[in-house]
Image (cartoon, helix red, strand yellow):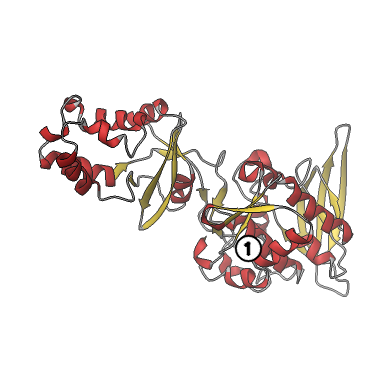
Amino acid sequence: MCALTAAQRNRRVLVLEKSNKVGKKILMSGGGRCNFTNYYVEPENFISANPHFCKSALKRFTQWDFIAMVERHGIAYEERKHSQLFCINSAKEILDMLLEECKLAKVEIRTHCEISSVEQLADDASQSKFRLSAVQTNPDRKKYFDLTSESLVMATGALSIPTLGGSGAGYDIARQFSLPLTERRAGLVPFMFSDATKTMCERMSGLATEVEIDCNGQSFVENVLFTHRGLSGPAILQISNYWHQGDAICINLLPELDATTWLIEQKSTQGKSLLKTVLHQRLAKALVGELQALWWPEHDNTPLAEFNDKSLIAIGDKLNAWMLKPSATEGYRTAEVTLGGVDTKHISSKTMQAKNQSGLYFVGEVLDVTGHLGGFNFQWAWSSGHTAGCFA
C-alpha cells in the first residue's frame, strides 16, 4: 500500500521483501478469505499507549477508500458478524489487487532480501539520506548489493507468526535511530492452562460456545473454542490483548440470562428433571458434563426440585461468572499481532515519519498500534501505509 501510493506520486520505489513471496499474512488471514476491513472503524478499536495517534491516518485513508479499491477490481466480498468484510472467493484476490496496483505504478519488488545494515548519510546537496546493504538469497547463489535512498519505510511487521516473515528487524532500525520501544507481547492469541483446566479443555477440544468474557475492565461477546492446549476462538483472542500474566478471566456462559433467576424458575416448572437435562437446553452436553463434575458432582441424579435455592444460586453465579486463570498465552508462534512496538510519541501521526530523522518512516504492526479482531489490523496497515506513501 505504501509502495503503490508513493509510486503514484512518480516516486521511484523498491520493495525489499524478506520472504520468498509477498503478502503471506494476507493469504492466511480469515481462513484464506481475508477479513480485509470492517464497516465500522473507530479509534476505540485500537490499542496504543497514545490512543489518539491512529486518528489522522484512519481519516486520511478510510475503510471506504479500501472498499472502493476492492470494488474497482471486481472482488466479490461479504459482510459477516460484527460488520467484518471478507472475500467471498479467496484472500489471493486482495494480494493480486495490491500487486496489480504496484505493477501499474512501476513499483519494483525483490523477494528473498534481507537488510544487513542501514547507514545514515550526511544531509548534503544530494537527496540520498540512507545507504542500505542487503543480500538476496536465491536457491543457487547469494547476491550482495548496496542502495541509497531519500526515504526509508519500515513495514516489517513484528514478532507474531515468524513463519510468515515477521521479525524484530524494524525494532533494530528504530533502536539504531534512537527511537524508544514500548513493551511488546503477543496479542490476539490463545490461552494455555497448566492445571486441571487443561485436561478438561482437552476432553472438549473442538467444542465452541458463545460467551461474554471479561478481563481488566474489557468485555467481548463472542465464541470461545476449547482446544487441546486450552482456550481459543474470537472471544479469547480479543480479551488476550488486555490480559497480563497472573490475571484471571471471567467467562459468562449464559450472557443472555440471569442464570440464578432462570434456574430457580426451572425448579418450579421442571422440578422432576435433572439439572444437567435443563442446562442441555442452553449449553452443549459435553460442557454441561464437565461443569457437573466441577460444581455439583454429588447431585448427578438429583431432581432439580430437590436442590435448595442456595445451591442453585451458587451454580447460577458460576454460570454467569466462571473464573479461570490461564498459565500463559501460546506466544508469538500463533499470535496474530504484536502488542506494543515503536513508541508513537516519536512518530508524526500526520506522516508516519520519525520526528528525529527526516526520511525515516514506520508503518503497520511495527508501531505501537494494535487493532481488535475484525479487520482492524489490516485497515491500520492500509491507512498507515497510504499515509507514509503520501509523504515518503
Image position of 328 (left or right of 251): right
Q: Position of residue 278 (x, y in %)?
A: 26, 35
- The residue sitting at 72% across, 65% down in the picture is 386
272 or 93: nearer the viewer: 272
Image position of 313 (left or right of 374): left
6 or 348: nearer the viewer: 6
Give the labeled residue for mark 1. 178
Task: Categorize mark 1 by other alpha carbons within 10 Å: few (<14), some (14-19), many (20+).
Answer: few
Q: Which image quarter: residue 379?
A: bottom right
Image position of 131 (left or right of 239): right
- In this view, 381 is above or below 283: below
Image position of 141 (left or right of 228): right
Q: Quadrant of the C terminus?
A: bottom right
Kind of residue indicated by mark 1: Ser
In what element is the residue under mark 1?
Answer: loop
- The residue sitting at 49% across, 46% down in the picture is 234
Q: Is residue 232 visible?
A: yes
- The residue sitting at 15% across, 35% down in the picture is 271
Q: Residue furthest front?
A: 269
